[in-house]
Image: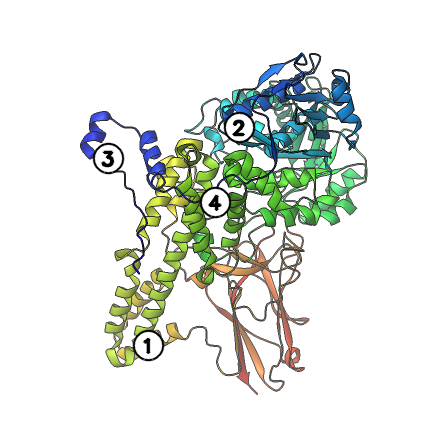
Amino acid sequence: MAMRRRPTCKIRLPISDARRFRIDRSWIALLLVFGTAFCSAAGAGEPRTETATELANAVVFIPERAGRVEKKAANVLVEEVANRSQVHWKLTHKWPDDPAAVVVAVGTEPELRSQHPGLDDLLSHTLATRGAEGYRIRAADDGRTVLVAGNDPRGALFGVGRLLCELRMTTGHVRLPHGFRISTAPRYPLRGHQLGYRPKTNSYDAWDLDQWDRYIRDLAVFGTNAIELIPPRSDDDADSPHFPRPPLEMMAGMSRLADDYGLDVWVWYPALDADYNDPKTVDFALREWSDVLRTLPRLDAVFVPGGDPGHTRPKLLMALLAKQVESLRRHHPKVQMWVSPQGFTQEWLDEFVQVLRERPNWLTGVVYGPQVRVTVPELRKLVPDQYPIRLYPDITHSLMCQYPVPDWDLAFASTQGREGINPRPLGEAAIFRAYQDQAIGFLTYSEGCNDDVNKFVWSGLGWNPDADVTNVLRQYSRYFLGDRYTEGFAQGLLALERNWQGPLLTNASVETTLRQFQDMERAASPRDLLNWRFQQALYRAYYDAYVRDRLIAETAQEAEALGVLRQAGAAGSLRAMEQAEAILDRAVTHPTAVDRRARVHELAEALYQSIRMQLSVARYKAIAVGRGANLDTMDVPLNNRVWLERQFDELRGLRVESERRRGIDALLNRTDPGPGGFYDALGDPANQPHLVRGPGFERDPDFRRSALVGFGTRPGEPLFWSRNAQSLYDGPLAMHYDGLDRSARYRVRVVYAGDNFQPRVRMEADDQEVHPLMKKPNPVHPIEFDIPQEATLDGSVTLRWNEEPGRGGNGRGCQVSEVWLLRQGE
């Protein structure tokens, strides 16, 4: 039986027409987005059937004496319902006279009780959850009243947000599950995100105030109660080609927007000047900070990182901040001051703790962020109880960061890079639950909208740490894309996270994930396809599948090329290398999955048009390739083609055939440890049998007690040196061997690699030194050392590596790519 062909649709624009009508990039982007989606009708699924109350004819009641935040909440409700359903609810301060009227009542509980007997009755029959920012939502049994009662003004705003997440909205219809009711208050008092208007971000620097208003509103709907701004002078360029406004003007505007929603405003303000022991430098800093921060309509707190960036000794830094508090309170009398020990060496951390033990009364609390050399529980023990701890978790980076993707495949690390679109809902939940009980809350570290999903997961868990993460994603999907996407898009986000788990080569679910998103894409409306959150997910799904297609092809090409080299004895070395090189060059001459590559480029253009996401340096003026511009890295080699061809060039320089064949044999057998020996590729989770892994990500998400797969790619080096196993700060990296020949001597061959060659590294075999602290060879190459025979007399040995103790910074440096344990004989 012949299979029916799937209908296809192509939209083509003749070049002459494009010239005639001078179609600009934005219109071309729309055509590209819609081109693959207009011609099929099935996919995302219809809205789910459930018993619901129709609210299309409702009015929104808000007490006349309500405060500005409650009134803002009511306006948010009316505007967002209209945006999603084209239903325009009327706002009123007078309860309707018609007893059949459908009313959504919004306000604080005391105000609402006095407005109408029915509201008092609803409140009396709804169990209250007390606590700041809490709320109750109750739909009357007759479907004529929906109550949103906040414990306070913010509670009214967050209650409206929850109602919006529960409403089933389609064109002309607004439905709420029948009898819906909830009473809740947040577990943590601080739930916020850093929103940095600066060139380093991958989109934020192009946003104007209307986009910021949209995004701050989105965050507030999901219970965010604080944002963190960045001053005009930071560790960044002073200007961006994307800035629609000067930084200080935008900073003041964003502060005003946050205040409109009743949200707290924090400022991340690094101390960047050279010498705060100089009175002139201190005077300059006092004037600069005052001039910047007094322009803000609202300022609740200032957070000063001790490092990353920053380089001032704790005593000098704390003395500066005491003066800054006195200065800033002239304009913002209740402003708080927070500080972090980021980047501190052990010596500086000890000094910092000593200052804290003097109980400075100007200091509000301590922040735990990236590059703090102790764990959150350890810091809590060191810091006096009077100072709360706030978390500053990095939710935006995927490698070389505070919480890297565990065991990430090298192909993704090389292409997606450090700041790719990174929904990690379950991973972020594991991070949150590992450490949040040590802190009062969080403001996350973000470098753009690439981490959008992660923000909403943190906000949801900050409200209720026991929340089902999948339900948080369902609310996210329903609110931002529509009711029919509630399940499909939520599961799609979980699937994107699974794409990044395990070896990419064998992860067939990557293809399944793409098919699921293609089904949603084909069924999407034009409005859906213009939704930047939908575009981000599509970009990731196509990008992941394209990288896997390339990895499969290029892995097979390398295997085939090595097979040809094994025939060099019969074909001759020069002929074998020529044939192998031609096979490897297919990656360039016969590229794979060109249709998927084209779709990724189309979606990159769509994302620039919709959200100004800068996925390329050349095309979209991103500040750097490593800052989310992974359109520029999607074609980097995924096999050892470049390195092998360089080896071929060297071997061709040898005049004697036998020498060339020995060189080829060395390439083919480079990992062979010989009889009785062992080989580990420590950066490959499938080939590190002797590595002591430790507790792992679920129990140790910042890898303080676990070995971590890290990366450090440099052009021309073999891929097996581009990844490594590493430990952080003073933690040891260990390998354990059993079943050794008790009578034999052993020698270790090791390749030190990674991204940081400044720290010195020491190796031990059990408790005996193999080599003292030494710099890692740069350029990278294997080095060998004898293992003391006493260490292997019992038939086992544990190798340990440590970097020099007490260092600060990012803690990386003890990084090992390959280890051979070579049996030398009796």
Residue at 49% across, 36% down: 200
Whichever of labels 1 and 2 marks the residue nearer the N terminus, that label is 2
In the drawing, does residue 713 fall left or right of residue 741?
A: left
Residue placed under numbered mark 4 in the picture = 420
Front-lying residue, 713 or 482:
482
Please name the amino acid that badge 1 sits on.
Arg
SS label for mark 3: loop
Alpha carbons under labels 4 and 2: distance apart: 37 Å
Residue placed under numbered mark 1 in the picture = 566
Image quadrant of residue 206?
top left
Vertical comparison of 701 with 204: above or below: below
SS label for mark 4: loop
Alpha carbons under labels 3 and 4: distance apart: 32 Å
Whichever of labels 3 and 4 marks the residue nearer the N terminus, that label is 3
Residue placed under numbered mark 3 in the picture = 13
In the drawing, does residue 252 fall left or right of residue 617?
A: right
Query: Does residue 268 appear in this view?
Result: no
**Is there CB contact under 8 Å for labels 4 and 2?**
no
In the drawing, does residue 528 fall left or right of residue 764?
A: left
Which of the two marks, 3 or 4, is nearer to us in this view?
3
SS label for mark 1: loop
Residue at 69% across, 36% down: 339
Front-lying residue, 418 or 544:
544
Whichever of labels 1 and 3 marks the residue nearer the N terminus, that label is 3
Residue placed under numbered mark 2 in the picture = 173
Residue at 68% across, 71% down: 767
Which of the two marks, 1 or 4, is nearer to us in this view?
4
Image quadrant of residue 646?
bottom left
